Image (tube, rainbow, N blue to C red):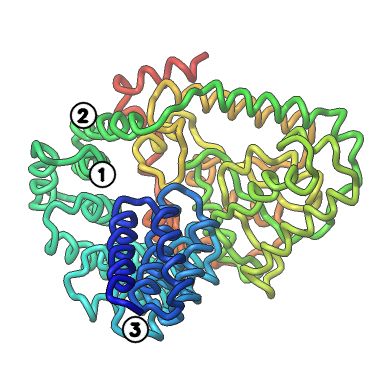
Amino acid sequence: MSKSRQLTIKQAILLAAKELEKGNFSKARHIYNAILQQQPNHPIAKEGLRKLYNILGLTLHKLGKLAEAVQSYNKAIQLKPDFVEAYSNRGNTLQEQGKLKEAVESFNKAIQLKPDFVEAYYNRGNALKLQSRLHEAIQSLDKAIQLKPDFIEAHCNRGSILQVQGRFQEAIESFSKAIQLKPDFAEAYYNLSKIKTHDEYDEMIRNMESLYHRKDTSPQQREYLAFALGKAFEDLKEHNKSFNYILEGNRIKRGTYDYKTEIDVERFNKLKEVFSSTFFSSHTKTGNPDETPIFILGMPRSGTTLVEQILASHSQVHGAGELLNLFKIANGIHTYQKKEEFPACMLHLNDEGFITLGSSYLQGLRKHSTSKRFITDKMPHNFRLIGLIKVILPKAKVIHCMRNPMDNCLSVFKNRFSRANHYAYNLKELGEFYYHYLDLMNHWRATIPHFIYDISYEALVLDQEQETRKLLNYCQLPWEETCLSFYKTERPIATSSYTQVRRPMYSDSVNLWMKYESELEPLKKELNK
């Protein structure tokens, strides 16, 4: 090839690199492919094309185009089978898609190719955590920390797993290490506050307040700190100061999204319209008759974790925690049916369809335990889907957890949720939502009587043994003393109640709302309607 010809290719490579840098992927790809048509093994052009597909994958991921991102990473890997960064990036995208097994395999490949790849160990640890493979997750994070002792996020995520396992002292050490490495790490302070009980105005509180009032503290950092300080001052029984911080944390959180209560009210009304008395009388013998599932539902912070922990302490029960399985099934009906979305799509299903849906749910549920007689699903918002449960799993147990509305809503308001409970961060909206939740529960009781077992948090606290016996009787379980010492049962608990259910029954939270009565007036006004 002539010197002028080589120069032309060099110019083309420089131009392609500039287009790639500007994010003009299509132009850059066209130039690289043109070069490779002339010189199929040109090393710089091949490297540029591999880099292009990897960066394109990252861009598509940010845009939420996850399937396209995976395809782009696959092309990068095809061009360079030992492209470790592409394997790791693909793993992150697969994880966000919920394809956790494939994600772990992609991280494993990256680690196999590069045994000191710190980020791959960290990412794999997070994916393993989502699979509830907590011991392996800790090992992977430990390896990341071994390779990079100042890996702040790895220390924090390690603490969150130890938290779920009930290994609180070790969790405290991990969060404290993260804060030591990054003194303004607000999320670590927040996680630490949830497992530490303050009995004095200590250094941790002083540090959080100092960081909270700093001008360069971001809104998200201030949000974490506000919820943490609210918890700290409640520990110290300084309820006025506690609530001011809680109020501010909620205000910041509420400002990050758009929401109208009318959206949920419309959904509830559609549920009542579709799942009518006529609907249930037309479908009296439908679904899969398997008795494995026990659904524990109600408002968040109503005692669902406590009830599950009691049942999971029984030798015949496996506690699977908060599962999204039922919502996935509900939202997927119209996909294969090619008709209206849930719940309207239910009107087009026949008996065979109900059996298929029930069997599909059971198949997913049994992955959590193959030996136990019963498996619990403790997703609180399954209260929206009781009608669906009735027609696809007619023999399932449905336990509805109830609590004093003021205490229940206060407990919701004090917590920062990992899921998008949009109604939770404004007292008026919270009261409105709670009213319509009660209305929907009354609808279920009226249309499918005797299908729901109501259990009161206050009654359970007042007379633990009697209420536990009644609960086991409803579940057709023989009495076992271990259910009274539920706090000794070792199992992962991934909800915000993980500290409460690892101690004996207590009544500290009953009528706690009275400590904040004047501040809760907007909530009280809505509930009084």
The residue at the point 63 percent across, 39 percent down is 383
The residue at the point 52 percent across, 14 percent down is 529
Residue tagged 3: 114
Residue tagged 2: 240
**Could you tell which of marks 1 and 2 lies nearer the N-terminus?**
1
**Taking 363 as reference, is 139 left or right?**
left
Residue tagged 1: 224
Question: Vertically, is 286 above or below 422?
Answer: below
Q: CA distance from mark 3 to mark 1?
A: 36 Å
Question: Vertically, is 33 above or below 195?
Answer: below
Q: CA distance from mark 2 to mark 3?
A: 54 Å
Residue 485 in view here? no
Residue 310 in view here? yes
The residue at the point 55 percent across, 64 percent down is 99
| Residue 439 in picture, x, y percent from top left | 63, 25
Residue type beneath disc 2: Asn
Corner quadrant of residue 21: bottom left
Residue type beneath disc 3: Lys
Viewer-side residue, 114 vs 354: 114
Contact between labelled residues 1 and 3, with CB atoms less than 8 Å apart: no
